Image (tube, rainbow, N blue to C red):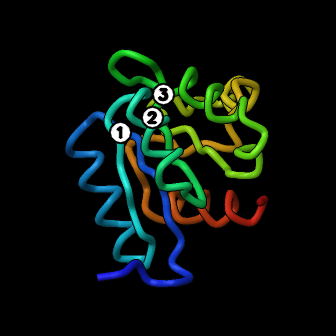
Amino acid sequence: MGEEKGKIKILLVEDNYMNLVLVTEILTLHGYSIVDAKTGTEAITVFNKERPDLVLMDLHLPGMDGVTATRIIKADVKNKDIPILALTASGLEGEEESILSKGFDGYVSKPIEVQKLLDSISKGLGSC
């Protein structure tokens, strides 16, 4: 089957299986097409192959972390308009500035709250 035209593709980079399943289910139910990666290195490979519309990047990944993977992706000028949102368990007050300074376009706190996730994605897509 061919991919549906007009469907927004999101790259979900998450090494925790339960989080991967949960976020994939939520986003699929809301009409998004999901591709995934479980490490920073895999994220770069999948990103370059799939050219997603938006990336949800876990910060803490085995091997290369999400910050490094994001910097590598954003270093290529043709990727600068693709929003990358950090997935983080440390969504503490005042941490947003620190996350944004690392090259992310926004963030989603864990545990995942469905409406906040969807709002963050809409906001991220609106900025491109």
Residue of label 2: 58
Marks 3 and 1, how far apart at CA: 9 Å
Q: What element carries label 1?
A: loop
Residue type at numbered disc 3: Leu
Residue of label 3: 59
Q: Is residue 24 left or right of residue 78?
A: left
- Mark before the other along the chain sequence, 3 or 1: 1
Q: What element carries label 2?
A: strand
Residue drawn at (76%, 51%) of the image: 81
Asked whether the beta carbons under mark 1 and mark 2 sit within 8 Å of each other, the answer is: yes
Q: In this view, does 17 lie above or below 63?
A: below
Q: In this view, does 101 lie above or below 124?
A: above
10 Å crowding of disc 3: few (<14), some (14-19), many (20+)? many
Residue drawn at (65%, 31%) of the image: 93
Residue drawn at (78%, 59%) of the image: 127
Residue type at numbered disc 2: Asp
10 Å crowding of disc 2: few (<14), some (14-19), many (20+)? many
Marks 1 and 2, how far apart at CA: 5 Å
Asked whether the beta carbons under mark 3 and mark 2 sit within 8 Å of each other, the answer is: yes
Q: Which mark is residue 14?
A: 1
Image quarter where the C terminus lies is bottom right
Q: Depth check: 23 or 111 in front?
A: 23
Asked whether the beta carbons under mark 3 and mark 1 sit within 8 Å of each other, the answer is: no
Residue type at numbered disc 1: Glu
Q: In this view, does 124 lie to the left or right of 50?
A: right
Marks 3 and 2, how far apart at CA: 4 Å
Location of residue 96 by image quarter: top right
Q: Which x, y percent locates residue 12?
A: 42, 49
Q: How many labels does the image show?
A: 3
Q: Which x, y percent locates residue 35?
A: 38, 56
- Mark before the other along the chain sequence, 1 or 2: 1
